[in-house]
Image (cartoon, grey):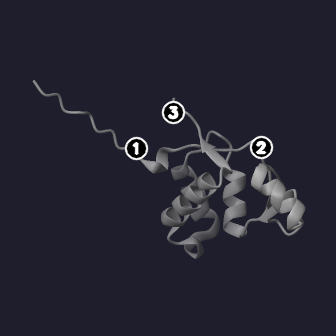
Amino acid sequence: MVRKKEIQEDNYLDYVPVRNPDFGWRVKDNGRVEVTVPNRGFFNRIAQIFFRRPKISYIELDEYGSFLWQQIDGETNIYQMSLRMKEHFGKKAEPVVERLVQFMKTLRSQHYIIYAERR
């Protein structure tokens, strides 16, 4: 008897992002979030010595990214964040879901966030 594997499709909007504690951040006077990224590792050290690259990079997010970054609390899922974004920015942020999902994928690929374990 052949058993079919259960296919479980995750809904990306159910994911709960959590900020990476290795990166600091602050809200600047202009209201934008600035993320502090330490440049560690062998190749970064070489770049710092030979090419005068900084030990720390400061990444300033745009108004949408700053708003969303501040919504990341380890409890709010991406769907809830999309509703808050739509409420805050209105039609100016359309298409909200697509924009938000792409932003979260970028944050995750750069290790700025992880996703909380499902409860």
Q: Residue at x 65, y 48 (%)?
A: 113
Residue position for label 1:
10
Q: Residue at x 55, y 33 (%)?
A: 117
> Where does residue 107 sit, x and y in percent of width and height?
63, 56
Q: Residue at x 62, y 44 (%)?
A: 114
Q: Residue at x 28, y 39 (%)?
A: 7
Q: Secondary structure at mark 2?
A: loop
Disc 2: CA contacts within 10 A as few (<14), some (14-19) or many (>=20): few
Q: Is residue 11 left or right of residue 5?
A: right
Q: CA distance from mark 3 to mark 2?
A: 22 Å
Q: Nearer the viewer, mark 1 or mark 2?
A: 2
Q: Is residue 52 left or right of residue 117?
A: right
Q: Nearer the viewer, residue 59 or 62?
A: 59
Q: CA distance from mark 1 to mark 3?
A: 11 Å
Disc with the residue nearer the chain's start (1 vs 2)? 1
Amino acid marked by disc 2? Asp
Disc with the residue nearer the chain's start (1 vs 3)? 1
> Where does residue 91 sit, x and y in percent of width and height?
55, 74
Residue position for label 2:
22
Residue position for label 3:
118
> Where does residue 56 sit, x and y in percent of width and height?
86, 57
Whether pointer 1 and pointer 3 mark residues with C-beta atoms closer than 8 Å, the reply is no
Q: Nearer the viewer, residue 51 or 93?
A: 51
**Which disc number belongs to residue 94?**
none
Reply above or below: 110 against 18: below
Q: Quadrant of residue 27?
A: bottom right
In this view of the protein, can residue 36 be seen by the observer?
no
Q: Nearer the viewer, mark 3 or mark 2?
A: 2
